[in-house]
Image (cartoon, grey):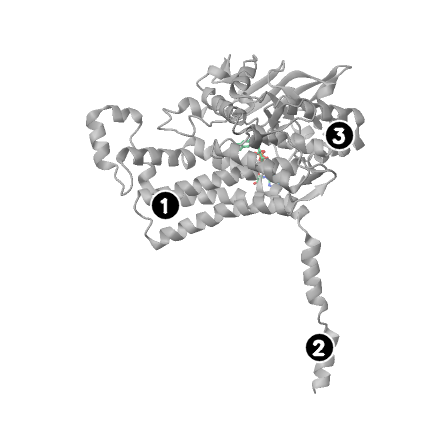
C-alpha cells in the first residue's frame, strides 16, 4: 500500500501543459528534458516502499491505516521529531541534497499549516475545513506538491496592485458558487513539472489594496488553464551520466506558472482576499518553521557531500599534505558540521505548541541566515582547491571511444590515488556540482530559496530572544553606579 515509483510516474501522465523551447511537451515522463529527474523522484518513492525501509520512511495514516511518508507526520514529541528527521535525511541522501523541492518540502509546509489549524479556524471556519480536508487528502495519497509563493519580479519598489498590469501577479478575476477564477503569474515552481499539485499563495508581505492577490489555494498541475513555462533543461543538455552525473539525473526544473483563467473550487481555497491571513498561515502556524527545517536537513546532507568533494580534490591532486590545504579542509569540515549542529540544536531546543512538538524557530532562522552565506563560500573554497583540474577534462565520454585519444588521456590525467578514468570521472562530478550551469543554479538556489538575505535576517531579528540578551547587559549595568563609584572614592580619600 506504500506509494512507489511506478505509481508516482504513472500519476504524471495527466495531460498537464508544459512549454519548453517554444513547444508544448506532451508527456514529461518520456521527454529528454525531464525523464531522468522524474525517475529520480520515482526512486525516492521506490526506496520508501522497500520492506526494509518502510518503518523508517513511513508512518500509518490515522484515517486510512495506509503507510505514507513521514513528511506528513505531525510530531508530538522530541523523539517523533527526530524519527521524522531521520527519514527526511535518509531521503535526501538519495539525491545528495540536490533535489531542493523534494516531496518532503511542501508536505512539511502543509503539515505545519494543519498543526496551526486554530489560526485558520479563528479566521474562517469554511476555509479552515478546506485546509484540514486538503491536508488529509494530500497525506493519504502521499501527494508530491510544489509551491509558488512569490510574485513575479517586475518593479520591486511597487506592491502587487501597483504594477502596470494588474494581472501580472496571479489574482482573482471572478467568483461564483463553485469557486474562484484566477489569472496571472507566480514564480517559481521548482519541481512543478514533476509534482502532482501546486500550493499557490504569497509569502511576500502584501499591502492594503492587494486583496485580490491575497490568496491561498492548491490545485492539480493538470488544471485547465494552468501553464507551466519551464526554464532551460540542464538534463536535456547533459551528454551522459559520466559527463554530467548530477544534472543528468537531478535537474528538478524551475518554471514560471501562468494561470490563464484557472477555476479553483472553494474546497481548495484556504485564504481568500485577506492580506493578514496569507502571512498568518505561515507565521501564526508551524508551517514556515517546518518547511525550512526540512530545507536545513537537506542542506546538511548536501554540505557533507561538498565536504566529500573537497577532500577528494585534495587527495586526487596530491595536495592533502600541505598545511594550508589541511586548514582549508578543516574550515570546510567545520562549516559542514555547523549545519549538522544547528539541525540537532533546533530539535533539542524545540518545544510543544498545542499537541505538537516543533523545532526552535530562532535556531532555524540563524541557520538560514548563515547557510545562505555559507554555500557560495564553500563552493569557492572547493574551486580554490581544485584549480584547473575542473577544466582540464576530456570533452566528453566519446573521447574514450578513440584508442589514440584514450592513450593521451591515460598519459595526461594523472593522480597519486586514482586511475585516469577515475580522475576524469571524479572531476566531472565536482564540476557538475559547483561549476556547471546546473551547479551555478544550485548556488542561486541556496542563496534565494528561503527569500533574499534581508528577508531571512528579518526572521532572525524578529525571533531572537532579545529580552535575554538585553537582560544580561542590564544585569551587568545594574551592578555598579556613578553614585556608588563617587561614594567609594570619597571614602577612600
Ligand atoms: C533556483 C530557484 C528556485 C526557486 N524555487 C522556488 C519555488 O519552488 N517556489 C517559490 O515560490 N519560489 C521559488 N524561488 C523564488 C525564491 O523564493 C525567490 O527568489 C526569493 O524569495 C527572492 O525573491 P526574488 O527572487 O523576487 O528576489 P527579490 O525580492 O527581487 O530580491 C533580489 C534582490 O533585490 C534587493 N531587494 C529586493 N527587494 C528589496 C527590499 N524590499 N529591500 C531591500 N532590498 C531589496 C535585494 O538585494 C535582493 O537580494 C526560487 C528561486 C530560485 C533562485
Picture coordinates of residue 206, whole percent (x, y): 70, 33
Q: Which mark is residue 274?
A: 3
> Does 444 sit left or right of 74 as displayed?
left
- Could you tell me how far apart the alpha carbons at marks 3 and 2 are, in whole angstroms? 58 Å
Q: Earlier in the sequence, mark 3 or mark 2?
A: 3
> In front: mark 2 or mark 1?
1
- Quadrant in which residue 213 is drawn: top right
Secondary structure found at label 2: helix
Secondary structure found at label 3: loop
- Could you tell me how far apart the alpha carbons at marks 1 and 3 are, in whole angstroms? 51 Å
Whether label 3 touches label 2, CB < 8 Å: no
Pick the quarter of the image with the N terminus: top right
> In front: mark 1 or mark 3?
1
Residue picked out by circle 1: 385
> Does 420 sit left or right of 258 as displayed?
left
Whether label 2 touches label 1, CB < 8 Å: no
Picture coordinates of residue 119, whole percent (x, y): 76, 34
- Look at 63% across and 37% down and name the residue there: 290
Q: Is residue 470 above or below residue 481?
A: above
Q: Is residue 92 above or below residue 344?
A: above
Front residue (pair 36, 57): 57
Q: Exactly how many numbered labels are in the figure? A: 3
Label 3 environment density (alpha carbons within 10 Å; few <14, some 14–19, many ≥20)? some
Q: Earlier in the sequence, mark 2 or mark 1?
A: 1
Picture coordinates of residue 193, whole percent (x, y): 54, 21
- Look at 33% across and 44% down and name the residue there: 315
Label 1 environment density (alpha carbons within 10 Å; few <14, some 14–19, many ≥20)? some
Residue picked out by circle 2: 485
- Quadrant in which residue 360 is drawn: top right
Amino acid at each position: 500500500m506504500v506509494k512507489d515509483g511506478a505509481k508516482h510516474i504513472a500519476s504524471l501522465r495527466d495531460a498537464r501543459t508544459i512549454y519548453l523551447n517554444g513547444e508544448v511537451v506532451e508527456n514529461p515522463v518520456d521527454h529528454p528534458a525531464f525523464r531522468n529527474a522524474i525517475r529520480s523522484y520515482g526512486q525516492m518513492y521506490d526506496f520508501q516502499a522497500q520492506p526494509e525501509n518502510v518503518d523508517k520512511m513511513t508512518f500509518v495514516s490515522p484515517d486510512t491505516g495506509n503507510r505514507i511518508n513521514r513528511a506528513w507526520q505531525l510530531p508530538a514529541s522530541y523523539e517523533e521529531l527526530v524519527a521524522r528527521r531521520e527519514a527526511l535525511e535518509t531521503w535526501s541522501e538519495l539525491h545528495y541534497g540536490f533535489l531542493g523541492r523534494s516531496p518532503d518540502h511542501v508536505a512539511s509546509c502543509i503539515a505545519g499549516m494543519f498543526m496551526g489549524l486554530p489560526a485558520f479556524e479563528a479566521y474562517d471556519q469554511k476555509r479552515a475545513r478546506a485546509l484540514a480536508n486538503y491536508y488529509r487528502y494530500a497525506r493519504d495519497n502521499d501527494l508530491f506538491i510544489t509551491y509558488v509563493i512569490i510574485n513575479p519580479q517586475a518593479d520591486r519598489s511597487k506592491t502587487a496592485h501597483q504594477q502596470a498590469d494588474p494581472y501580472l501577479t496571479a489574482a482573482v478575476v471572478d467568483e461564483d458558487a463553485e469557486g474562484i477564477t484566477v489569472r496571472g503569474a507566480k514564480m517559481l515552481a521548482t519541481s512543478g513539472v514533476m509534482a502532482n499539485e501546486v500550493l499557490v499563495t504569497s509569502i511576500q508581505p502584501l499591502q492594503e489594496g492587494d486583496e485580490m492577490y491575497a490568496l491561498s489555494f492548491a490545485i492539480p498541475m493538470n488544471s485547465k488553464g494552468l501553464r507551466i513555462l519551464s526554464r532551460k533543461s540542464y538534463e536535456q543538455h547533459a551528454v551522459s551520466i559520466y559527463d554530467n552525473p548530477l544534472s543528468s539525473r537531478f535537474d528538478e526544473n524551475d518554471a514560471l506558472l501562468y494561470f490563464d483563467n484557472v477555476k479553483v473550487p472553494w474546497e481548495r481555497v484556504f485564504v481568500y482576499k485577506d492580506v493578514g491571513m496569507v502571512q498568518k498561515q505561515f507565521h501564526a502556524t508551524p508551517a514556515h518553521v517546518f518547511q525550512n527545517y526540512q530545507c536545513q536537513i537537506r542542506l546538511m546532507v548536501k554540505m557533507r557531500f561538498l565536504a566529500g568533494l573537497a577532500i577528494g580534490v585534495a587527495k586526487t591532486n596530491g595536495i592533502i599534505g600541505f598545511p594550508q590545504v589541511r586548514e582549508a579542509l578543516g574550515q570546510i569540515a567545520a562549516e559542514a558540521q555547523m549545519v549538522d549542529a544547528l539541525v540537532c540544536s533546533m530539535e533539542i531546543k524545540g518545544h510543544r505548541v498545542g499537541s505538537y512538538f516543533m523545532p526552535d524557530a530562532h535556531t532555524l532562522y540563524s541557520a538560514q541566515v548563515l547557510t545562505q552565506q555559507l554555500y557560495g563560500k564553500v563552493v569557492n573554497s572547493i574551486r580554490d582547491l581544485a584549480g584547473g583540474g575542473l577544466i582540464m577534462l576530456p570533452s566528453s565520454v566519446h573521447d574514450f571511444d578513440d584508442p589514440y585519444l584514450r592513450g593521451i588521456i591515460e598519459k595526461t590525467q594523472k593522480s597519486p590515488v586514482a586511475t585516469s578514468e577515475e580522475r576524469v570521472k571524479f572531476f566531472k562530478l565536482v564540476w557538475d556540482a559547483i561549476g556547471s550551469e546546473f551547479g551555478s543554479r544550485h548556488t542561486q538556489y541556496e542563496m534565494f530559496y528561503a527569500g533574499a538575505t534581508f528577508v531571512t535576517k528579518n526572521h532572525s531579528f524578529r525571533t531572537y530572544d532579545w529580552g535575554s540578551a538585553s537582560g544580561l547587559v542590564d544585569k551587568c549595568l545594574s551592578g555598579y553606579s556613578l553614585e556608588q563609584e563617587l561614594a567609594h572614592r570619597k571614602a577612600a580619600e
